[in-house]
Structures are given as C-alpha cells and as structure tokens.
Image (cartoon, grey):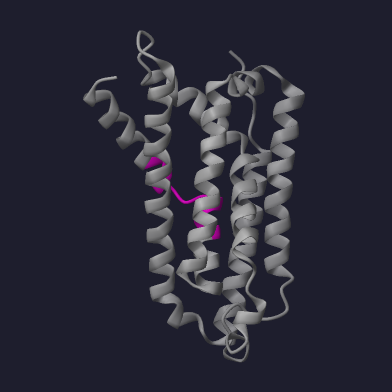
Amino acid sequence: MDLHSILAFTLVAAIAIASPGPATLMAINNSLSYGPRYALWSSLGNACGLFCLSAAAMLGLGALLASSEWMFNAVKIMGAGYLFYLGARQLLKKSPMLAEDVRADRKESRPSRLKLYKSAFLTATTNPKATMFFTALFPQFIDQSAALLPQFLLLTSIFMALSLVSLSLYAALASRAKGMFTRPEYSRWISRLVGSTFIFFGAAILTMRRQVA
C-alpha cells in the first residue's frame, strides 16, 4: 500500500467520521451530563466497536449482510431498537440533564465507565450501515498483491484514531458550551432534543435497504 492510498483513505474516512451520527450524539450527551472524561469512555467503546465491524467486513460479514435479507433486517432491527431505547430513556427522564438541583449529587447518579463503554460499543456494532461502509471502502484501498493483515491493521487504526479525535472534539465543545444549559428549562429541552435525535437515527436505520448487486 503506497502513501497516496493511505492519504486518500484518511481523507475519505475523515469526511465520513466528521458527519454527525449516533456516536457523536452519545459523546455530546455524555459530556453534557457527566463531563468530557466520561465521554472518553463512550468514545473508546465506539472505537472498539468500529474495530469489530472492520474485522467482520474483512471476514466477509458485509458481503453476507448484502446477500442475506433476513440477516440484514435482523441487524437493522437490533440497531434501530437500541437507538429507540436510548431515545425513549432521554425523553422519559424525570430529572433535567444539567439542572442546578441535580448537579450537586451528580457523582451518585453517574453511570460506571464500563456501562458507558458497553453502550457505545453496542451502538456501533449494531449499525449495519457501518459494516456495509467498511465492506465498500476497504477493497478500494487494499493492495491485493501485498499481505492483507498489515493493511487491515493500518486502515482500521487510522479509522479508529480519527473517530476518537472527532468524538473527543465534539465532547470538548459540548463541555465548553454546557454553561448555557444549566437552567432547568434549557436542560429539559436538550434532553428532549437528544432523545428525539436518537429516535430519528433509529428510524433512519429502519429505512435502510439492502443493496442488491
């Protein structure tokens, strides 16, 4: 794999990653609710989920999803269902996200780092769009005459690093702006917006159609 291919892959991956999605929303939500350090754990969970999707794509899962209607729909429904769950949990939350009377005991209400990690990991791995993206993207930059494993590790590492940087930037920006949302009325609207957006992403996944060659 030459330098030109690596740079081209990095550019395409950066554009794809910069586009807001469920992982971005999760990083912003966790940063606003618990702080940017906690958002880092969900970002790591997303990066590890991307690694698993990348490996699955290289092993042929993407092609299997493209050829199997029921498997594609099963993964799609699982991913959408989990996003619906996250959205409903935000919409039904009784306490404001950053209300003054809640922030005092935020330590007690913070989820564990493992829970944040697992939630982001599950969100990433149940997104069929990401698997199909890896399946379509990787062959364009893989040198078929060279060893596959080093190329896979390089491209996947670049993608994971870009994802971590992007989500960390979103989380940092959200943390800087959270002073605007400490009022209970603003906080409730943010919770509703976050919940509605999760549900929107879930609905968008349900509208996906399997690409038939």
Residue 55 as seen in the image, left or right of residue 78: left
Residue 140 as seen in the image, left or right of residue 121: left
Q: Where is the N terminus found, in terms of image quarters?
A: top left
- The answer to which of 212 and 144 lies nearer the viewer is 144
Residue 160 coordinates in the image, percent (x, y): 43, 42
Q: Could you say which quadrant of the image residue 130 lies in?
A: top right
Q: Is residue 17 magenta?
A: yes
Q: In the displayed structure, would residue 50 be above or below residue 138? A: below
Q: Could you say which quadrant of the image residue 78 lies in?
A: top right
Q: In the displayed structure, would residue 54 be above or below residue 24? A: above
Q: From which residue to which does the magenta span run?
A: 15-26
Residue 137 coordinates in the image, percent (x, y): 44, 26
Residue 54 as seen in the image, left or right of residue 155: right
Residue 60 as seen in the image, left or right of residue 172: right
* Residue at (70, 28) in percent of width and height: 72
Q: In the displayed structure, would residue 60 be above or below residue 88? A: above
Residue 49 coordinates in the image, percent (x, y): 56, 42
